[in-house]
Image: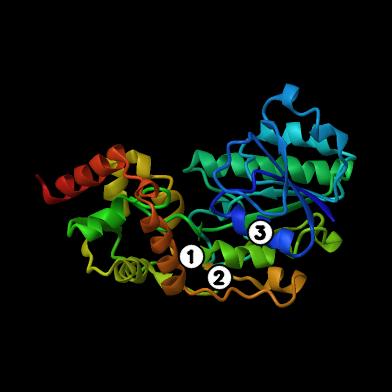
Amino acid sequence: MKVLFIGGTGNISTPSSKLAVSKGMDLYLLNRGKAKVHIDGAKTIIGDINKPNELAELKKHDWDVVVNWIAFTPEDIERDIALFKGKTKQYIFISSASCYQTPLSYPVITESTPLHNNLWDYSQGKIQCEDRLQKAYREEGFPITIVRPSLTYDTVIPIAIGGFNKYNTAKRILEGKEIIIHGDGTSLWTVTHSDDFAKGFVGLLGLQPAIGHAFHITSDEVLSWNMIYKILADALGKEAKVVHIASDFICKVEPSFTGTLLADKAESVLFDNTKIKTFVPGFKATIPFSEGIKRTITWLQEKPERQNIDLETEAKIENVLKAYKGL
């Protein structure tokens, strides 16, 4: 099976690239030649998907599957439809579980949960992409599959404030400084290791019954945010000094947190993974957060340059803490 990944060396996509190669797929990666991760067994096409003059080599190929890991706008989708219509048997768009209805009218999320999130530009862009692809499928027969990852981690720390590709909150825990947990910390969330995500995702590659369908792929482990931060602190070998602050207050003081909180992580979510398990029999997430985050911390601490401390984020955390304490 001949597969193209546009991207393929990021936090979510790297394990999927490795697993695809291990299963004997003929994997090509389209990137600018600056990827920090090397995928043994994959071929690389050098080019920027956003620059038409760099895509001559790409246009020579036909594909069984094309996956775009880095499409965010309807313009990206229009470009891809023009590039790959009649050139691929399946086009997979990486959307986001943040597209689901916010706030939820029903607590359990299935793939039929409405897509509506007017609080985050990122989610709105992804919804518009899905709308255009569904139209292309219905009217032109463009062979789409949509995948909506939720909070998925490997080389990042999956928390709401001062985490993901930033090491700020981890460093604060190590230094005994206060950290912020939104709300009272009892709302529920699911974090998924990228290795687990890959098992479900790679099972969709070339799967013709998946054409026209959307899927989310998450762990079945449900944790409160208090538990998530406690497990992170345990992995760091420290006890966290927690300050619980209402999400509304946090976002009023620092509106830049609105997307990650009020539009996403402030609300409890419970994912029903029946659909991916039906289409990919045997899929099961097996890496608990307590194990996965230890891997992440070990990787981050192997090289200090991986520990990205963002000064702007640090200032925002301090600003919220001071405002909350009335300083």
Q: Earlier in the sequence, mark 1 or mark 2?
A: 1
Q: Quadrant of the N terminus?
A: bottom right
Q: Residues within 10 Å of mark 3 (few under 14, many from 20)?
A: many
Q: Which residue is mark 1?
A: 191
Q: Earlier in the sequence, mark 3 or mark 1?
A: 3
Amino acid carrying label 2: it is Ser
Q: Residues within 10 Å of mark 1 (few under 14, many from 20)?
A: many
Depth check, front residue: 188 or 168: 168
Residue occupying the point 69% across, 25% down: 51
Amino acid carrying label 3: it is Lys
State whether residue 28 appears in this view: yes
Q: Which residue is mark 2?
A: 219
Residues marked 3 and 1 touching at CB (< 8 Å)? no
Residue occupying the point 63% across, 65% down: 110
Horizontal side, residue 35 vs residue 23: left or right: left
Quadrant of the rendered structure where residue 279 is?
Answer: bottom right
Q: CA distance from mark 3 to mark 2?
A: 20 Å
**Residue 18 badge:** 3
Residue 18's spot in the image, x, y percent? Answer: 66, 59
Residue 12's spot in the image, x, y percent? Answer: 57, 55
Q: Earlier in the sequence, mark 3 or mark 2?
A: 3
In the displayed orientation, state which residue is furthest to the left. 327
